[in-house]
Image (cartoon, grey):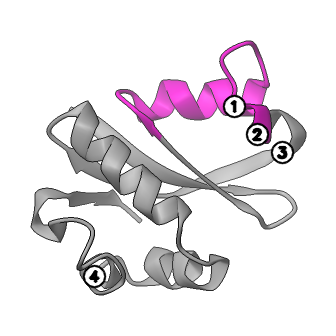
Amino acid sequence: MYYTYILRCKDDSLYTGITTNLERRLKEHKEKGEKAAKYTIRHEVIKMEIAWKSENRALASKLEFNIKKLTKKQKEELIKNPQLLSKYLRDKIQAELYNEYFN
């Protein structure tokens, strides 16, 4: 199982990534160690906003890639209303292949 997630940083920016273990990955970002993303080393992570489950890495990566193309406003709306995934990415992904993990 893979997860695509959105993190909120202290400066109110958003970071999108993928992982097989949400708790471990959030800890890596917060601790700013070797496995943290370059972005989250420079931007302090506050919390995980939302995540979606997918069956494999390819699906998770495709969702991550397409979420990263959204505007910040669209990402904020997606966090508030995950059902917008199919609206924003209707031509890019099959939204039914992704299950919201938590919000």
Instruction: Looking at the picture, tell me which residue is in the foreground, 59 or 55.
Output: 59
Q: CA distance from mark 2 to mark 1?
A: 5 Å
Q: CA distance from mark 1 to mark 4?
A: 28 Å
Q: Secondary structure at mark 4?
A: loop
Residue under numbered circle 3: 44
Q: Amino acid at mark 1?
A: Ala
Identify the image quadrant of the N terminus: top left
Q: Secondary structure at mark 2?
A: helix
> With 32 as the anchor, is 58 left or right in this view?
left
Q: Amino acid at mark 4?
A: Gln
Q: Amino acid at mark 3?
A: Glu
Residue under numbered circle 1: 37
> With 58 as the anchor, is 103 left or right in this view?
right
Q: Which mark is residue 4?
A: none
Q: Which mark is residue 40?
A: 2
**Picture quarter containing residue 2?**
top left
Q: CA distance from mark 2 to mark 4?
A: 27 Å
| Residue at the (19%, 58%) spot, across then down | 98
Q: Are marks 2 and 4 in contact (CB under 8 Å)?
A: no
> With 92 as the anchor, is 65 left or right in this view?
right
Q: Amino acid at mark 2?
A: Thr
First-in-chain label (4 vs 3): 3
Packing grade of label 1 (10 A; few <14, some 14-19, many >=20) is: some
| Residue at the (33%, 84%) spot, across then down | 84
Q: Are marks 2 and 1 in contact (CB under 8 Å)?
A: yes
